[in-house]
Image (tube, grey):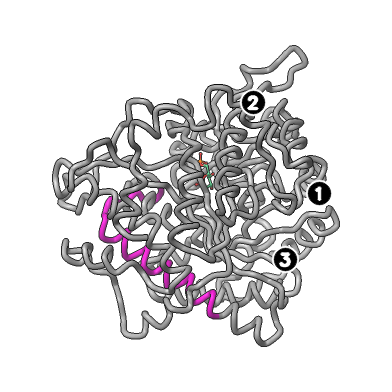
Amino acid sequence: MGDAQEADLRGTEEDTQAPKQGGDPEAAAHRYVLPEDFFFGAAMSGPQTEGAWCVGGKLENLWDTWSNEDLGAFYNRVGSYAGNDFMARYREDLALMASLGLTTWRTSIQWSRLLTLDGSINPEGAAWYHELFRASHEAGLECFVNLYHFDMPTYLFRRGGWESREVVEAYAHYAELAFREFGDEVLHWFTFNEPTVEPEMRYQEGVWYPKLRDFGRARGVQYHISLAHSLAVRTFRRLQQAGEIRSDAKIGLINAFNPTYTKDDPSEADLEAVRMVGGINNRWWLDLVTAGKLPADVVKTLEDRGVCLPTRPGDEEILAEGVVDWLGCNYYQPRRVQAPQAATDERGHLRLSDDYHWPQARINKSRGWEIYPEGLYDFGLYIRDNYPGLTWFVSENGMGVMHEESNRDAEGVIADSYRIEFVRDHLVCLARAIEEGSPCLGYHYWGLIDNWSWANAYKNRYGFVEVDLGASYERRPKRSAAWLAEVAQTHRIV
Ligand code: BG6
């Protein structure tokens, strides 16, 4: 993806004033049918659902440690401990997903549950995942398995975390053991979820434990995760050739791809901000998983501006093996940037952009994220045009809303028409991209069943299914669940 294409993604007044689906989204939606073999499913992660944080030999990960050290950092003081009680309720949840007409779902193996301190398999952890994959199969659901969802084991963090080569090697070892253990059960593997987000939240923006604010360190982490990803793909290919992984299994990467836009009539400096922000968040991963290398222009600009990646001889050969079979795109919101007011921030770290607040933006006020379904259409065409041959799916998309309990109808059911509208608008944009040739194979909704959302805990609810914290995590479908079931079963966007 070159500068020109990336610049083409900037919003212009013409394409951003009104959604392209026209003034009557419902009527427009009726025109859209998703392909027959398009899959619908649900995305979730181990640390946000499983609970049972310190039983069955599970080690602490950074979420547990942060919860133990500073519970007040979590909304309503709800720490990592219980997830949404999935380990106790997985059969019920799988049946629920199947009853809605879903055919696939994703979770993640927790590194801190599968391996012991000495890096060998924890038999209790392995038994749980074997049981989970068996139950999923019995429920008629294909389970997509991700190996890492922001859940660094704490003892490895204390040895340097993603800033350490030792930990990169430890991840490669963990991936190998997971492939060997579950290689004949799992069809769809993913190395990482959102490898851009952890560097940003933990090392750059000071949001997640240990709340660092260092742009350069964040890029080093991003680089090491790129190596870890590539080493895992290398091992996957080797084991598959040796017959230790199903011959039909595929491996991919999931990232939060935020189409990057700037203002109308941008200056050269605004476009430069788009190039670098889009380059680090999007192109970095797209180039890695299709060409086995990082975008040279981005690396060069970083170097020119004093941010050198922790490269070593032999790394290029490792990165070259990072090419995947397909890609997951988590899409929640676009990124809107403009030239930064200053070249460095208050701590003297490199600053590539300032946020641009588009006056017409529609915001989900609970989460503070812009709702812009067109971004999914733009991403679809971007892939079609710049990464031909790369198949993809929407691996997360969803709407988190606060205080949903105040939306109960006369029968006590949460009436979440806004969620239907959100998903419908995104599916319409996706259908348009597919019609125009983008090879998108499916859609996973994030948070089908309300789950624990990191420091926000249960503040914003994403689910089509409510989790009642006051009633032992009881599950109750919201009004939107019936709508989802109809769409998933008919493939018509009603
Ligand atoms: C994605 C993550 O970034 O967005 C999920 O993969 C996360 O883990 C989801 O929960 C929604 O974001 P949040 O912060 O509202 O939970």
Label 1: which secondary element: helix
> Which residues fall within the magenta stretch?
208-234
Give the residue at x 24% y 48%: 271
Q: Residue furthest bottom?
A: 242
Which residue is disc 2 drawn over? 27
Q: 59 left or right of 228?
A: right
- Horizontal arrangement in the rendering, residue 119 relative to residue 3 (left or right): right
The image position of residue 419, as x and y in percent, is 61, 29
Residue at 42% from the left image edge and 52% from the top image edge: 197
Q: Is residue 30 above or below residue 160?
A: above
The amino acid type, in three-letter code, at marker 2 is Ala
Q: Quadrant of residue 440?
A: bottom right
Q: How far apart in space, not on screen, are marks 3 and 2 (Cα)?
A: 52 Å
Question: To which residue does mark 1 refer?
Answer: 91
User: Mark 3 = which residue?
Assistant: 124
Rounded to the nearest angstrom, the CA distance separating label 2 from label 1 is 38 Å
